[in-house]
Amino acid sequence: MASDTTASAATPIFDSLPYYDDDLQKYPHLKEKVDKELARELKAPQTLHPRVPPPVELFANNPVLKAELERVAANKPFPQLDTLRYSLPAPISTPGTDEEWRAALDNAHAQLQHQRIRQQNLALLQTYGANAWRIQNYLLEATAKNVEKALEELREMTIEVNRERKNTQDRLGQQLTSLETRWTELISSILQIEMANLALDAEIERLNKKEAELAQL
């Protein structure tokens, strides 16, 4: 018995049918009070609903892309390109030392190799880049279509849930209205019976008095 009482006490009971009740439309002063109360007490929830999934951490395994994403989110300007590594500086001293000329020669070899790799990459991009771009666009379009389809299905489910809620509340509201009307009729009948009983009691008392008066005569 105690467990049933505890369970019933823990379960919230909502006696409102917002799709059916029209008290706020009938009585504008009630709507003003409700709006004032909502403006005073309505606050944004501090915690998300338990069914809301946790936020997705993007590029958790790629610190470079993660830093770039944070830069874009913070609206910070893109850092300037380091063009110093693309130049061919000569030795500072005149005439340069062997170490300076060796460093300049190594830099020239590195720049030459870099240009060769760029040419190879450009050739590969010219050969295969168009198809790879088309495939990537196709995958992105397919992903976008799947997301749009899931969104449309979710909207339809939401509409269906609201439709079922409205139909259920309309049905229950009509039942409640019918029961309330029946309750009012029964209360009225009881009051009429009580009034008739009072009238009969008064009539019986009058007849008893009259009978007593006749008996004395």
Image: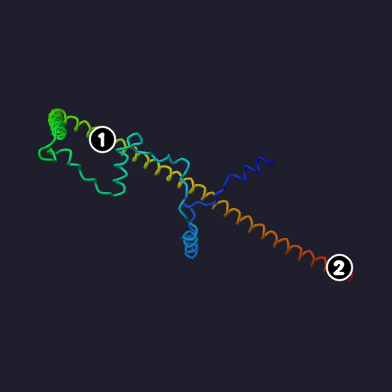
Name the residue carrying label 1.
Answer: 140
Per the rendering, the mark at residue 212 is 2
Residue 83 image offset from top left, x and y in percent: 17, 41
Tell me which corner region of the image, top left, top right, bottom left or bottom right, holds residue 144: top left
Q: Which of marks 2 and 1 is nearer the N terminus?
A: 1
Left or right: residue 145 compared with residue 205:
left
Q: Is residue 133 left or right of residue 11?
A: left
Q: Position of residue 20 (x, y in %)?
A: 48, 52
Identified by mark 2, the residue type is: Ala
Q: In which quarter of the image is residue 8?
A: top right
Instruction: Pick whichever, 183 or 43, lies toward us.
Output: 43
Instruction: Give the Cα distance between marks 2 and 1.
Output: 106 Å
Q: Report if residue 67 is visible in the image.
A: yes
Q: Which of 145/137 is in front?
A: 137
Q: Indicate left or right for 107 with 203 as reference.
A: left
Looking at the image, residue 211 lies above or below residue 47: below
**As drawn, 170 above or below 24:** above
